[in-house]
Image (cartoon, grey):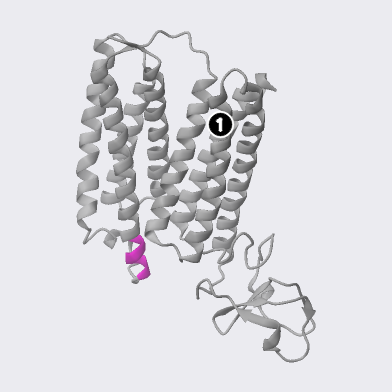
Amino acid sequence: MKKYFLRISKTALVLVYLVIIAGALVRMTGSGMGCPDWPKCFGYYIPPTEISQLTWSENRDFQKGQVIIKDETLLVATKDFKTGQTFDKTNWEKYTKHDYAIFNVYHTWIEYLNRLAGALAGLACLAMAIGSFWYWKTNKKITLFSWLVVFMMGFQAWLGKTVVDSVLSPLKITTHMIVALLIVALILYVIKKCTVSNTNLETNSKFNKLLWLTLCLSIAQIIMGTQVRQHIDNEVKNGVTASVLWLQNPTLIFYIHRSFSLLVLCLNGYLFFQNNKIKSSFSKINWVIVLIVAEILTGIAMFYFDFPFASQPIHLVLASLLFGFQWYLILESRKSKLN
């Protein structure tokens, strides 16, 4: 089992990133409330494909917990029963978590696939945690952090429920994203702890401090980016459907977010220069630069070219990949020689 552990850990990492991608698609398509309940979807394990499944009708069997939409309200079946010729309200209770009662088959299945991706990632993380027991005698941190990942995945699932219950609260969406990045960081830590590297990496305290600074700036950028996205969501809710108008009157956060991108690029460019100067072998810095440039280009595309298709999820996924590379650089630098 131990010889497969690294492969399982990397699989878990890929699947967690897949969940981030799926979440970005949910946000892009406005599908966050595609399933208004949790963990089921309209009371079903496999969500409905047409509105008739959520409409009351005569001589139909319902199971406890199944949902219908009646008079723009979600109603939940209180028991197993078969409908008669008239609607009997005693068989139903109003869904109390929120009053959102809209069915859109595309939004429903996009959100449902996002949940399936989360469940698959959770199973991979559980497999990683079980496999980590083989490291208990030699490196207890691998086992402890692997099980911490499982705990965080459970917390993330619960947090997803609160996001739905709050009808997509901006603060909870931001927290949801930060927790996803924390899970990525924990898995990368586990991968690093069980990876044997033959590369001689030399660095100094100045270089290490810059690595931490650039990582913190990237996290700040991600947080501000979620706030910019929330402004766009509010514009859409207010009836502004033309993408060219979404950032016509942006908030102050947008300008800070845009300006910080240049600071992030310059600081990482300096890191790239220092990496070559001290003749180190942090090759991942090359990927960091590529991802930052790509981030800036997608940001420019969204602002000046009216949000081209998929530019928003790509922007978010690039940011999460950037975070992963920067964090792994820090993990590598902790094992390097200090001058």
**Residue drawn at (37%, 57%) of the image:** 171
Magenta-colored stretch includes residue 236: yes
Q: In the rendered image, which residue does mark 1 sit on?
A: 144
Choose between 191 and 280: the one closer to the eye: 191
Q: x%, y% of residue 47?
A: 66, 62
Q: 113 left or right of 213? A: right
Query: What is the quadrant of the N terminus in the image?
Result: top right
Choose between 269 and 216: the one closer to the eye: 216
Quadrant housing residue 35: bottom right
Please name the predominant secondary structure of the magenta segment in the image.
Answer: helix
Q: 178 left or right of 95? A: left
Quadrant housing residue 88: bottom right
Q: 254 left or right of 78? A: left
**Residue drawn at (32%, 68%) of the image:** 240
Magenta-colored stretch includes residue 313: no
Q: Is residue 57 visible?
A: yes
Q: Quick one: label 1, few (<14), some, or many (20+) residues within 10 Å?
A: some
Which residue range is magenta in the image? 232-237
The three-letter amino acid code for the residue at tag 1 is: Leu
